[in-house]
Amino acid sequence: MDKYYLLLGIVLVFIGIFGIIIRKNLITMLVATEIMLNGVNISLVSVSHFLGKVDAQVMSIIV
Amino acid sequence: MELLVFVVISIIAIVSALGAILVKSPIHVMVWFLGFILSVAASFFALKADLLAGLQLVIYAVAIVVFYVLVITTIPWEKVKMFEGFYKKEFVFALPAFLFTIGASIYLVISSRFSNLRQPLPKDNVSALGTVLFTKYIAPFELASFILLIAMIGAIIFGKEKANG
């Protein structure tokens, strides 16, 4: 089950990179970076769920 | 049931993220981004990270979206119009690379076997997270607050320089 959320995080990070590459507008590029950050957050939280520890969630707060 | 929740959340998240990077007007981008943030918060709830889901709703869905909309309204609309649209050539070249890297990493994650270290998560997410944050990770936390303070001072200095001329 946690693997699926890891996949979701990976797909979101790549969507963010794609958005930064193709857009001209600076605000949209900032939104794409936010999408990348949220993908990383989902990956961290899914690993935290997988290991049963909250350390990864602390790193997600710092992100 | 868990799988159904995941499928719904991930479809909403991916569709709204794609909408946020493919829609033309910046205001529409912000609306798609708001939907994306809400779906991410839902996935945090599904992964039993209650505190992070609440922070996601408070910080992103309220503060950052309002901040971006304020920025959009302060910039003159002609300047926003000037940078509208896509880089066409980059779009054509990046799309196959994008699909290939997504496919390769999905294959890697699915074909790999994870180590079996599973423990049950602590019952009270908020108190467990607070305990770890203020004991084990107190040094990175203080460092992050210090860096944010420096960034705030820098922003004030730059703003003052502009106001003075």
Image (cartoon, rainbow, N blue to C red):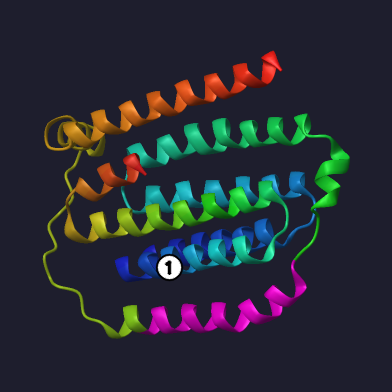
Quadrant (top left, top right, bottom left, bottom right) of the N terminus of chain B:
bottom left
> In this figure, which residue is indicated by the disc labeled 1?
A10
Q: Nearer the viewer, residue B17 or A26?
A: A26
User: Residue B21 appears in which quarter of the rendering?
Assistant: bottom right
Q: Is residue B140 left or right of residue B27?
A: left
Q: Position of residue B85 (x, y in %)?
A: 80, 60
Residue in the picture at 68% in, 74% down: B90
Q: Position of residue B164 (x, y in %)?
A: 68, 14
Chain letter for the residue marked with disc 1 in the picture = A
Evaluate whether residue A1 shows in this view. Answer: no
User: Residue B18 appears in which quarter of the rendering?
Assistant: bottom right
Quadrant (top left, top right, bottom left, bottom right) of the C terminus of chain B:
top right
What is the three-letter code of the residue carrying label 1?
Answer: Ile
Q: Position of residue B54 (x, y in %)?
A: 41, 36
Q: Nearer the viewer, residue B65 or B48?
A: B65
Q: Residue furthest front?
A: B165
Q: Nearer the viewer, residue B123 or B106?
A: B106
B152 relative to A19, above or below: above
Q: Is residue B46 magenta?
A: no
Q: Position of residue B95 (x, y in %)?
A: 63, 79
User: Residue B22 appears in which quarter of the rendering?
Assistant: bottom right
Residue in the picture at 62% in, 31% down: B67
Secondary structure found at label 1: helix
Residue in the picture at 39% in, 29% down: B148
> Magenta segment range?
B87-107
